[in-house]
Image (cartoon, rainbow, N blue to C red):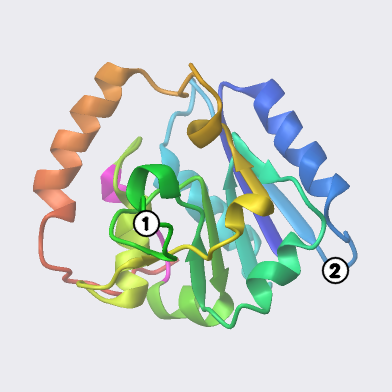
Amino acid sequence: IGIGITTYNRPAMAAECLANIRKHTDMRDVVIHIAEDTDRQRKGVAYRKNQCLRALKDCDRVFLFDDDCSPIKTGWVDFFIYSGHEHLLFLNDKLHNPKGGGWFKDCGGVFMYMKKSAIERVGAFDERFGLWGFEHCDYSRRIFGEHGNYPCLNGTDQYLFAHDYSTPNHKSSITDEEKNTHVRNNWYKFFNQKIENIYIPL
């Protein structure tokens, strides 16, 4: 089992994430890698996620956490592994799917689960997305195909907690101005285009 945590300028949040992982996880046969973005060497989400994938390349199952998302219940690893799915996300059902189904049109990146087979098929996150915006959607889309939906299992919120979804006034690691700039740039230049390369070397 490989667990990657990406963090930027939130040491307390990263410490909370790591503590919850250790509390709710059987740590035998588990490798944890923390990839920290810094003001001095700011590389962005895709770059740091790729650091995690490279560090965890020998793992059969990989879980990627943002620092503001973490497990809240023991058994979370088996919940995802024994679902039979190759790739899963944790999405906000109140925002994306008010009817409470398990398959979503929209994609979030607070948490990702992938089998090794999926990672080997698509490789790395696309670092053209820069600091932030659509890199997670692009990765899932490359796994499932251009017109595929993004999978989130019913009951995921019983095992995981995301501050983005549940904490009022939760502070993002980047400013709204940065978000808006990167969303506009990444949508038009990269994401809203036909997929040219399913596989990106890791």
Residue 74, relative to residue 182: is it above or below?
below
Mark 1 surroundings within 10 Å by alpha-carbon count, few (fewer than 14), some (14 through 19), many (20 or more): few
Q: Secondary structure at mark 2?
A: loop
Range covered by the magenta-colored residues: 123-129
Based on the picture, tell me whether residue 127 belongs to the magenta stretch. yes
Q: CA distance from mark 1 to mark 2?
A: 38 Å
| x then y, percent, for residue 169 | 48, 16
- At x 67% / y 79%, what residue is drawn? 82
**What's the mark number on residue 99?**
1
- At x 74% / y 45%, what residue is drawn? 72
Splitting the image into 4 quarters, where does residue 58 fall?
Answer: bottom right
Apparent side of residue 123 relative to residue 85 in the rendered image (left or right): left
- At x 20% / y 72%, what residue is drawn? 147
Inspect the image, locate mark 1, and give the three-letter code of the amino acid beneath it: Lys
Q: Is residue 1 visible?
A: no
| x then y, percent, for residue 126 | 32, 56
Q: How many marks?
A: 2
**What's the mark number on residue 144?**
none
Which mark's residue is nearer the viewer, 1 or 2?
1
**What's the mark number on residue 29?**
2
Mark 2 surroundings within 10 Å by alpha-carbon count, few (fewer than 14), some (14 through 19), many (20 or more): few
Rendered-image quadrant of the C terminus: bottom left
Q: Secondary structure at mark 1?
A: loop
Residue 183, relative to residue 12: is it above or below?
below
| x then y, percent, for residue 14 | 68, 32
- At x 41% / y 37%, what residue is drawn? 44
Closest to the observer: 37 or 14? 14
